[in-house]
Image: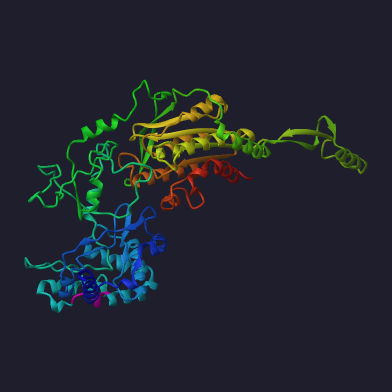
Amino acid sequence: MEEFIGKIWHNWVTKAAAGHYPEAAVKLGEIEKTAGILFRAFGGDPGLKVAAATPEEHGARRTWLQRIAASNERIAQGRRDAETLRLPPEIAAFPEKSLNRDLYLWLAALAASDVAPEQPWFIRNQIASRTALDRYPGLNERYRRLVAAHLAGRIAPSAMQADEAAQEKAIRQALEQPGSVAGLPPLNTVKAKPPQPVLLWLIGSDKIEAATKLADPNDNLPPEGSGGNPETAKEAHKAEQVETPDNKNPVLAMFRAESLPTWAEYVRVNRAFDEDENPNASQAANDLDKLSLTRDGETAKSRVKFDLDLPSAAEDDTPIGPGIALPEWDYRKNAMQPAHCLLQPMVAHDAVPAALPQELAATARKLRGQFAALAPQRRWLKGQPDGPELDVDSCVRNHADRASGHTPESGGYLAQARCERDLACLLLADLSMSTDAPISDSHRIVDVIRDSLLLFSEALTATGDRFGIYGFSSLRRQNIRFHLLKDFGGKYDAAARGRILAIKPGYYTRMGAAIRQAASILAEQPASRRLLLIITDGKPNDLDIYDSRYGIEDTRMAVHEARRLGLTPFCVTIDHEAGAYLPYLFGPAGFCVIRKPEELPSRLPLLYVQLTRQ
């Protein structure tokens, strides 16, 4: 009974406090695609992704009913940083669903028109609002309706003390007439509250941007995460940079035996390596309202732990040559960094010649039969100056031409010619640690990739097409491993199968450097059509700043460079989240998502046929 009455009270007082209308709520998932398209169509940065913001305490004045209901303490507001446009996970601020939907679209248009990010929050939003309304007059009516609905739900200036009221009046005027207020009046009293959240504006992201600058260009920081696609949660926490506290270890405050333990403000969550000492650190961080980031000066310990993952020279694959220095694109500087990465070609040292696995034999026979139809065939060429047989039609035509006083235009022989497929394909496989993930009780992703490479090779051997197969992984920019499985000059034989069967997952996915090297190899092949086929299970990432938009932009630039060389890059992925970033990297027609990883071995050769169809 007590719980029942409590529910009734909570529902009634929350509804009476207003400011939240669950029956008219619009969720980000319903509008995310539309908002993203609108943001880019209005000129927003195409490299930004749309994701959810997290609720934060605003500390502003609330009505007495809101205080009784303990509601409206936290609110999620839109913001943008260097990598993401963050929008509220749900908007239920207005009683009409159409208004809540329009607020999502307005925030997308506002973010696309954010032309003065260096200005203070109050001025910046006015400039962005004025810019959006001037560029797109069709937004004016919706904007006016949103302003009217938002102002009706705000606390009136008459219910505030003088300095708060002055700020509220300035905000109201700035909303009704963007660009008409030069600045926000200061608060003069100690007990004054900050202004109420402005739902139609983006909040400032100074602290967030400062936190993102913690990335060390010298690769001295531990990583943000690992795995093929670490972005499983799209929410972002508010962050700030702080000094390292004296007591750096998590503290349990135990006041009584029955007290609940609590986390201290400083929680070391930057131990993203395999032997993580505290697997609950990430969950604890998600429970914090604000994440405080700092450099603790203990990167040497982390570096030693990571480097212990490297095999010894005796157990590692065999390097081929001294390594290749490659450039890398820095989108922040809008410049290419020459010789920024070191790529090391390698070949498996423990690979032994092997036959095709028995479980793939039946599928391989079927593929070879299908692909044999694509093999070059001999055909007769008519009207040749010489050949093993007479061309009767040409002889009759030539005789008629001579009889009429004309000179014959063609020869009188038939000759055979071999019709070669002028095509070269390089298959580049992601061999990062994330491919060690299981997809069934008996198979991992790397097993599926291994089977795909074998069946792909069997199929292309039947066609006679020239092809090469390489794999890659990375451990920071100075250790990019480029595995030779089959080059263009070598045959697909037992030795090549042995190298494919010897592949094993490890490390990370610095995709830009691997694509550049693969493109360089493929560009040397004398073929009119050259296909660069990339197999991966996740987005580009590495231990340093590559696990961010930096890696996305570098990979995108590498793809553009490959196209300028006359190549056709195409990505095949099993990452279900690939739709969020692959269109930006390869274009809308430059990738394919395999929803069921176990289908990759059978689908890859057929996909090759579609891509190389004349």
Q: Is residue 321 above or below residue 412?
A: above
For the C terminus, the image quarter is top right
The magenta-colored residue range is 150-155
Q: Residue placed farthest to the top in the image?
A: 314
Q: Is residue 276 magenta?
A: no
Look at the picture and state if 292 lies above or below 314: below
Asked whether 543 or 73 is in front, the reply is 73
Q: Quadrant of the N terminus?
A: bottom left
Residue 430 locus on image (x, y percent)? 44, 38
Closest to the observer, 557 or 386: 557
Q: Quadrant of residue 537?
A: top left
Residue 153 is a magenta residue? yes
Residue 491: x, y in percent?
A: 57, 26
Q: Is residue 180 visible?
A: no
What is the magenta segment's predominant secondary structure? Answer: helix
* 249 sits to left or right of 467: left
Q: Nearer the viewer, residue 433 or 557?
A: 433
- Report whether residue 421 is seen: yes
Q: Is residue 413 left or right of residue 274?
A: right
The image shows residue 60 at horizontal and vertical percentages of 16, 67
Question: Is 43 left or right of 55, judged from the image as shown?
Answer: right
| Image-quadrant location for residue 355 | top right
Residue 53, above or below 502: below
